[in-house]
Image (spheres, helix red, strand yellow):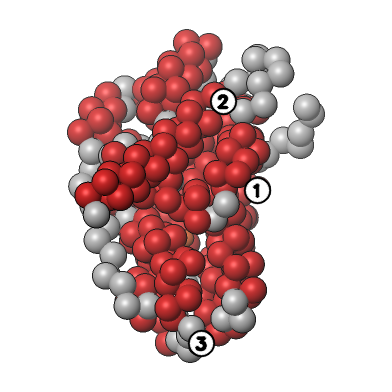
Amino acid sequence: MPRKNISHEKIAEHVQRLGELYPPIALDSVDRTIKRPDLVAARFGHVIDYLARVELEVDRNVLELLVLLPDVDDTNKIFYSDVWQPQEIQHGLILDRLQQDLGRQPAAPYLDVSFKIKILGALASLKPIQEVAKLLYFLTGASTERQAVLAYNQINTGLKELGETAISQTIITPIKQQEPGHFAFYQMSATAMIQDKVLKPWQLFFARVIRERSYNLVGTNAMPEYKADMGGVAVDLGIDQDLAGYAREIGRVESRLLWADRQGMEFPPYILEALRESVQMYQERLQRGLALS
Ligand SMILES: [Fe+2]
Ligand SMILES: [Fe+2]
């Protein structure tokens, strides 16, 4: 599929525009009126808990980036330090306060950089490995930001149906406006690497192998508890009704860039497997809970 070349200037301009258009959302810009907190908590409490934690984990994501990409360039530096981190941390703080307004526990973000990332980081002092890590970092960003866009869209629809105008208009809508720009940054950055042929065939092969073995849905941190939580989010948002359709949505960028030679692959199979695993783990947890009660 022919696409217009993505220049580094274009990505740099995009980052600058995001910074100008979307200052971090201030905590006191939020209208905290909730008409029926019990109902909102019952329908979306678990999803809001999950998103609050994941947004607050942005500080770990920045540490991971510094471990994986020690030679990060100016555009990436400006993106994570001036645009992305300041925006995401506000998403986290606002959602964390919302979940407490709903009578739920404060978020407990997981902030330790994993052993696997540290190993890959040690290897990333070698330039060819760092190039692989960079592509995987961008693909992860594209997939997770897409998941954020979809989740906020679905919550917003649900909140409007419940007539919760204040939270919809002053929390979810402003957050939701900032996510597509993050997605576009990662999508353009990954596309530019492939289009510029930064990676040699062996590096691309290596990238596919690692991706297949380490793909994680947003916020699961490769940990069973979080995977089961994510399964709960998928059920609450109705994603479980069409897991393949959702896999297609969140896997589109990497299907195109990493698996272009696999004719007819609608989405990378490991994405659907991760979704199925999460939903199954959630259902097993529910059954365990029922068995105990
Ligand atoms: Fe966010
Ligand atoms: Fe984001």
- Point out residue 151 in the picture as x, y percentages from the top left corner: 54, 56
Instruction: Return the residue at label 2.
Output: 268
The residue mark sitting in front, 2 or 1, is 2
For the residues labelled 3 and 2, say whether their Cβ atoms are less than 8 Å apart. Answer: no
Residue 166 vs residue 236, the one in the foreground: 236
The residue mark sitting in front, 3 or 1, is 3
Q: Amino acid at mark 3?
A: Lys
- Point out residue 30 in the picture as x, y percentages from the top left corner: 48, 84
Report the residue at 39% width, 22% height from top.
213
For the residues labelled 2 and 1, say whether their Cβ atoms are less than 8 Å apart. Answer: no
Residue extending furthest toward the right: 2
- Point out residue 109 in the picture as x, y percentages from the top left corner: 27, 57
Q: Which mark is residue 35?
A: 3
CA–CA distance in space, label 3 to label 1:
44 Å
Instruction: Return the residue at label 1.
Output: 10
Q: Amino acid at mark 2?
A: Pro
